[in-house]
């Protein structure tokens, strides 16, 4: 039984609390939050205790820590939790600063404690089924990957300003998905971005629409498309062309009803909210973490994966800024 | 807070236990079962007490009873629970005997206590969305309803023998769905059935494949197709043609992955297991029950609906036996 | 080179003229019509001569006759053309009178000349692909067939009055499709029909909506649904459940464009007009006829098939009139 | 009646011959070819005369010339035909040399004769329906365009060597499609290409897989994916995200049959052969040309469009060679 402390009590922490409680091999023993009342409320809901972050980390009876706090605290919490001997699952991204994330990785490596980064989409039943088919050689050798990832609506400008930008905040999921599916890091990153959805996003120094092309040393290519707005819902699709065929993971729809009238044939939209779409993936993610810890197997996503995705975001930013392809090695140092 | 006692501790009772516990307006206080160990186990899992059925019904602090026992006990338990002042949600069918079910209805009517029959498919998000579109007039006036309802694999012959037959055991769901969507009972029922899936089912006196046509007094027609075997999964589709269009509720698929190769384009199968398909409908069903009880609104499915569906099954049996259309009034007396 | 005379110069005759001309193994040499001007116009368009029906049948240089005249002339023209030594492709139905059609069959049998009835849907690429998959055993043994066949809009009442009724005029195609796919004639026919689309159709003594169940001697079942109105287009679907799976032939759509907006996901409607939908099947039908004649192989659809479908329509009429299942043997005599 | 001479008698010339003959406003009067026997054969098939190219161009009774010869002759034939007063429809590309194509444009501009370039995909019913929906504002303002364009199998290396390379030979269609849908030329072109399908293609100096990103002056972005091999068929899809939704043109399938078995749900593949897919677009293209000429309306695709697409291919080549984004103005001079 993995005795787990949860750091953070916001919306996504609630999702993790459910997963930790429901898993037969883990139990939620404590929760902390910057705002103690939030921790108390969540603790009451899940029948555990509200404590400070420091208390949770210092408690030797707690085996695992799930970090769902704000991004700027991630690196430090990963370091202190691993230093205290805990296994860690931390929400993405590791940090907004690549340098800081790399320092965190160095520091954690010395403890030898396993740290997993919460790229939950790897555990989405559709994407993981696609990956299994790929691994089974069902379309031969992969050649060209396409990821379409559109949010239903842009976040408030106030969020945009502290988000680290589209590449670090949003496309980072897709960078990790590319790494997950291609099984390798790209050599070169070429990004184009613009603010066509909302000029205020541009004014805030960010882009809202972007296309990033990844080139691999063996010639393979991946392309990622992001938009902050797809009014029809949360558009999350992946397709990969291989020597023997094509694999696609399509959108999940709100329901299966189809209406045919004189004006056309109408079906349901993709699910609109990311939690609707990815709820199963959070449960699967936690289960994969627990299983790996229990068995001593390698974690399915590592801190290094988190640093890699962040480096790709950094390269994309540089590519847009300097209007040129950027080698990943330039930013990884 | 609706204090609820659960009668029965089998597989479907477990599903209901989850729904009762998860609903913020109800709490599971006790569970009973023919096999006391089963009740104890379920009670332990949900943090309530295991008691006898008699104790639960006699306990004045219990408001509601959910009956998930074997069919032959339903009528009696409905009667004793309502006589004891409880509101009741009972699994379908009311009884295998139409006469007994009708007696139960008469008896319950005198108590004035609300009894809901568990036709959970009315609460499936797809079918209920279809019904809403129908009610909103999106396809005009309904004219021709088709229900396709195939199980993935036939049950054991031992089950077939006590099931009451395909019409009472399986198609009864579809009879209720027809009543739900057409908003009226049919006038005439014309059934064709055969044993083409497994001769042992025929030898046991049942059919495994059937088509039933329902004629309504205003000329509308419904047709229901049942098979005990669809090797590709649980095939649950509804379509209804109206004066202004067609509404279809299609199957839910296991995932959204599509593979295109030189041999064809392959997508996922329909979900195979009925609980996978209908899990949300059980939760919605319980929520609808609780909401109606709380607000004093009429129940969305009544004991009378349960008797009606059973009468349609009886008419279908008679139609097959005598190879002729049977008026519903013949069996309803 | 099959030298062909075309009897009739209406809309469907024009479709056949194109097929005859385009086929490298046949040539259109003459066309006749009740209204000579029509024949002249069609002849001019296809570079052949306009003649009388009698002249065409009497002309020994003409090998084949395609009969696309009004239904009431079919039997007689089949008889005279075969008596004159010609091979014949005749539009469906053979006749509105089953007795007359049977007499025609007897008469033609004595000449030994091949006569094909124009059930063009057998040659539709979708349905013929489905049949090939069925024959290849891809879904094992067929058990339950469903045919959905809805016209986009009802014909004028004037046409309804002379059409012979929905079963002989419209569902006859589906009866033949059932025979084509099930590879056998049904034993019993049970029909329900109503006039819910347009009361004037009912007043004219016909139904506009019907469900017919066919029972086969080996237990298999087929069900056919017809409606004279589906405002979203020409709805032509077939599905067949077998021991190892399900085969479906779905509708052809006007185009492949899909639009996703805040109000839903909209795709194109089924093709609206029967010629749009079945144009390739007319060309394939003629090609199959020519190939069979050329090679001496049996025709893919025979006059006997035409009589059989008509008998099924007759049985359906009787079933509706007497509100009982009708054995096919009752009407076939 | 547009009296038309056809230059070239190869496979695609045959497609055009059919379109010219079938159109009620045009007639095919002569055909020429580098190999006179080919011209004679095609002429015989379509009932016209075989002549030399020079004779056709010199014949004042011929109004229009359709150029379907090898690419290296296009510019010169366009020039001589327009100089002779003819209207011209020329197959794409205008030339392999952008400089030569620009000279051709200058030369033709002086004659004032209309020249259309055969970007037939603009006339595909799916893409033209998508464009109509876009123009009608059905998804608001366009923001992000994606074009997927995969051939079923690579051509022979001998063809690759003379093709001008993937960008000029294959993606040129997609460049024009982007221009057609975005209604503007891009500012910057950023291309990534590799040889992952067949190393022999790489050895021949070409790429077989490529992703090109187009940036527009107003911030909009387009991305084009090409592969020389998609074993499941000819994959031709377009999607465009706008402020109010998404428009997609999906693949056309070989048939509508769907098979569901224990191993999955299988549907038909996309049509495999480009002529199967685009046959209607060739007929529509010719009809659009004839209609414009007849009415004096501007041509729907101009020689300038042909030069523009070629310039984009040139820029893509430069982008791959120098591994940097290339401004279109760099190559357009």
Image: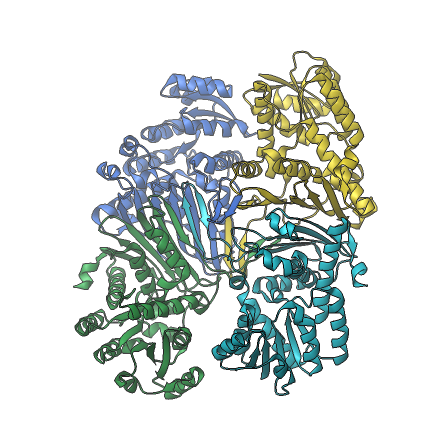
Chain colours: A blue, B yellow, C cyan, D green
Quadrant holding the C terminus of chain B: top right
Residue in view at x 59 percent, y 42 percent: B142
Q: State whether residue C332 is above or below residue B33.
A: below
Residue in view at x 76 percent, y 36 percent: B329
Which quadrant of the view contains residue A54? Answer: top left
Residue A170 drawn at (x, y percent): 35, 39
Apparent side of residue C53 relative to residue C101 in the rendered image (left or right): left
Quadrant holding the N terminus of chain B: top right
Q: State whether residue C101 is above or below residue D187.
A: below
Numbered marks: total: 0
Residue B43 drawn at (x, y percent): 66, 21
Q: State whether residue D203 is above or below residue A299.
A: below
Residue in view at x 47 percent, y 65 percent: D272
Residue in front for this viewpoint, A152 or D232: A152
Q: Answer yes or no: is residue A179 visible.
A: no
Apparent side of residue C256 relative to residue C239 in the rendered image (left or right): left
Q: Answer yes or no: is residue C45 visible.
A: yes
Which quadrant of the view contains residue D305? Answer: bottom left
Residue A180 drawn at (x, y percent): 43, 46
Residue in front for this viewpoint, C295 or B20: C295
Residue in front for this viewpoint, C290 or A263: A263
Residue furthest top in the image? B60
Residue A196 drawn at (x, y percent): 27, 44
Apparent side of residue C287 relative to residue D183 in the rendered image (left or right): right
Q: State whether residue A273 is above or below residue D256.
A: above
């Amino acid at each position: 039984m993995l005795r787990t402390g949860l750091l953070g009590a916001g919306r996504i922490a609630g999702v993790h609390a459910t997963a930790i409680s429901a898993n037969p091999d883990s139990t939620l023993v404590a929760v902390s939050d910057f705002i103690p009342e939030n921790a108390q409320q969540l603790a009451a809901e899940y029948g555990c205790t509200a404590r400070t972050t420091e208390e949770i980390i210092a408690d030797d009876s707690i085996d695992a820590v799930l970090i769902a706090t704000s991004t700027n605290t991630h690196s430090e919490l990963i370091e202190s939790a691993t230093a205290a001997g805990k296994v860690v699952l931390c929400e993405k991204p590791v940090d907004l600063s690549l340098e800081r994330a790399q320092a965190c990785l160095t520091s954690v490596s010395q403890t030898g404690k396993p740290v997993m980064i919460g790229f939950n989409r790897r555990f989405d039943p559709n994407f993981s089924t696609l990956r299994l088919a790929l691994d089974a050689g069902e379309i031969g050798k992969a050649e060209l990957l396409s990821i379409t990832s559109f949010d239903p609506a842009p976040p408030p400008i106030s969020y945009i300003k502290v988000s680290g930008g589209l590449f670090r905040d949003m496309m980072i999921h897709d960078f990790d998905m590319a790494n997950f599916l291609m099984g390798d890091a790209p050599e070169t990153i070429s990004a184009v971005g613009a603010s066509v959805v909302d000029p205020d996003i541009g004014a805030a120094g960010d882009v809202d629409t972007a296309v990033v092309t990844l080139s691999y040393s063996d010639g393979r290519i991946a392309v990622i498309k992001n938009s902050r707005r797809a009014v029809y819902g949360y558009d999350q699709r992946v397709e990969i062309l291989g020597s023997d065929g094509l694999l696609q993971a399509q959108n999940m729809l709100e329901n299966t009803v189809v209406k045919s009238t004189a004006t056309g044939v109408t079906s349901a939209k993709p699910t609109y909210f990311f939690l609707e779409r990815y709820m199963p993936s959070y449960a699967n993610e936690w289960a994969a973490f627990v299983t790996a810890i229990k068995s001593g197997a390698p974690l399915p996503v590592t801190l290094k994966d988190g640093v890699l995705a962040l480096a790709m975001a950094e390269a994309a930013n540089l590519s847009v800024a300097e209007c040129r392809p950027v080698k990943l090695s330039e930013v990884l140092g």
